[in-house]
Amino acid sequence: MYAVIKTGGKQYKVALGEKLRIEKLNAEVNQEVVLEEVLLVSKDGEVKVGAPLVEGAKVIATVVAQGKGKKVVNFKYKPKKASARKIGHRQLFTQIEIKSIEA
């Protein structure tokens, strides 16, 4: 059993018991979140595809952790101009564990 969900402007294929990192959600650790933007559900060989969403389908997950990803460094340099610019960024994420998929 699996589903394709949309959250944070991205699409993820999820299955029961799977842990994944998604864009940051406003939720506490160990709190349940309901993801209702389900694009596709596959259960017992039967596939339901939404147009654009599957009606009545939802994915229930538990927040495992909140954190920051690895640092990405952007360095811009212009030769012969004494110009250099260094910027760092760490993307926030939420790690979730899929508890159930309801279709």
Image (tube, rainbow, N blue to C red):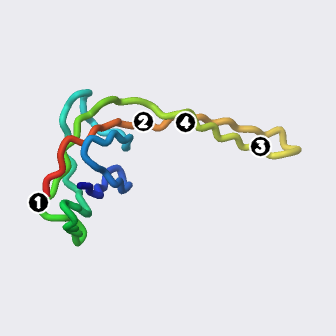
Residue bearing the label numbered 4: 89
Q: Is residue 9 above or below residue 93?
A: below
Residue bearing the label numbered 2: 92
The answer for how far apart the CA atoms under marks 4 and 2 are is 10 Å
Residue bearing the label numbered 1: 56
Choose the circle earlier in sequence order: 2 or 3.
3
Counting from the top left corner in percent of width and height, residue 46 is at 19, 67
Q: Nearer the viewer, mark 4 or mark 3?
A: 4
Q: Secondary structure at mark 3?
A: strand
Choose the circle earlier in sequence order: 4 or 3.
3
Counting from the top left corner in percent of width and height, residue 94 is at 35, 36
How crowded pointer 4 is (Cα within 10 Å; few <14, some 14-19, many 20+) is rated as few
Q: Quadrant of residue 89?
A: top right
Residue bearing the label numbered 3: 77
Horizontal relation, residue 80 to residue 39: left or right: right
Quarter of the picture containing the C terminus is bottom left
Out of 48 and 74, give the one closest to the viewer. Answer: 48
